[in-house]
Amino acid sequence: PPPSGGVPPSRAAPRRTFRISATGVVLELAANLKVVKKLKLVGAPFKVFKNTAFVKDMFTSALEVAKFEGAAIRTVSGVRGQVKRALKANDGSFRATFEDKLLRSDLILLKAWVPVPQPTLYNPICNLLVPHGKGYARMRSAAEVRAELGVAPPVAKDSLYKPVERVTRRFNKLAVPKALQAALPFKSKPKQDAKLGKKRLKKSSHKAVRAVVAEPEERAAGIFMQQLHTMYNERERKRKRAADTRRAAHDKVAAREQAAKDAANKQVRKKHHVKQGLAEKRQARAGDKHGDDD
């Protein structure tokens, strides 16, 4: 079929006339096509420098590292890098460069493509003339042969899913140098509460598990003090609300008085400017009259 044409592969079955095995579309017509599959290799750094790291557990020999020299790699956190050279030890470890410094707990991924060899079978048919009623005797498929012989299909151990064991990450405690502590403001300095954690009582001690039972007089005194605090808080709330109301009324009156004051000042300034303008005109006329008399 031409490119972009549909292809429905079918297979003959002894109990059925045919069976659709798959459906697809023709992408390209070529004599030699390579079928590839995705491959993701995972490694871990065992020595970390500024922009360089030594990676292990990704390859098994220096020859494999040589095949992937210059390949692009990437960490789970998104830091990009490149495979450089294999180390002297022939265990698959290599040196790689990255954009930023890595952590020892980072995972390094290499995404590649692996060619999948396709088995080619050749079944020559010398004579198509078969006795009547027997039909064409084709070659049996591998699945049919296994079904007749009762053999289970082969299982590749490397293709099986394995349980993922993730180690719990443990972060180091933040250690602030003394010189930096002296330069920090007081609210940012580490307090002494952190040191008291080591001196806290253990849960198994009798002081930690001992219950405190209050006497009736102490319980009554505690209830009385709680009522006093409640009454005080209620009075403070009412006082603040009244103060806010008075402040709002005062601000309204002050705004009205200020507006009236601004209007009066505007009229005074207007009258002053009018008088000043008339006086300047009179002076100008008087000057012109004296000039004509001369």
Image (cartoon, helix red, strand yellow):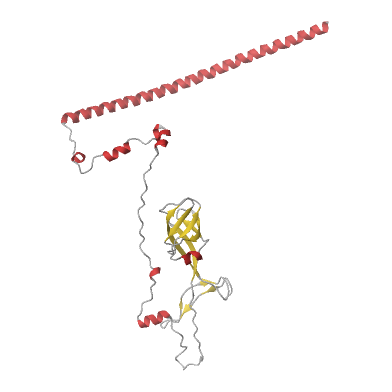
Is 182 drawn above or below residue 205 in the view shown? above
Tell me which corner region of the image, top left, top right, bottom left or bottom right, holds residue 150.
bottom left
Residue drawn 45% across the image and 63% down it: 40
140 and 187: which is toward the camera: 187
- Dividing the image into 4 quarters, which one contains the C terminus? top right
59 and 23: which is toward the camera: 59
Q: Is 275 situated left or right of 109 in this image?
A: right
- Dividing the image into 4 quarters, which one contains the N terminus? bottom right
Residue drawn 42% across the image and 80% down it: 142
Q: Is 278 situated left or right of 293 in this image?
A: left
**Number of numbered discs overlaid on the protein picture:** 0
Tell me which corner region of the image, top left, top right, bottom left or bottom right, holds residue 187.
top left
Q: Which residue ends up furthest to the left in the rendered image?
A: 216
Task: Kindly tell me whether residue 146 is visible in this rendering.
Answer: yes
Q: Name the spot of residue 156 as percent of width and height, x first.
A: 39, 72
Q: Which residue ends up furthest to the front in the rendered image?
A: 88
Q: Is 189 situated left or right of 257 in this image?
A: left
Is 16 drawn above or below residue 161 in the view shown? below
Q: Name the spot of residue 293 as percent of width and height, x first.
A: 82, 5
Is 192 drawn above or below residue 156 in the view shown? above
Is 256 drawn above or below residue 193 in the view shown? above
Task: Kindly tell me whether residue 38 is visible in this rendering.
Answer: no
Q: Name the spot of residue 269 as percent of width and height, x first.
A: 62, 15
Q: Is 232 situated left or right of 63 in this image?
A: left
Residue drawn 81% across the image and 8% down it: 291
236 and 193: which is toward the camera: 193
241 and 75: which is toward the camera: 75
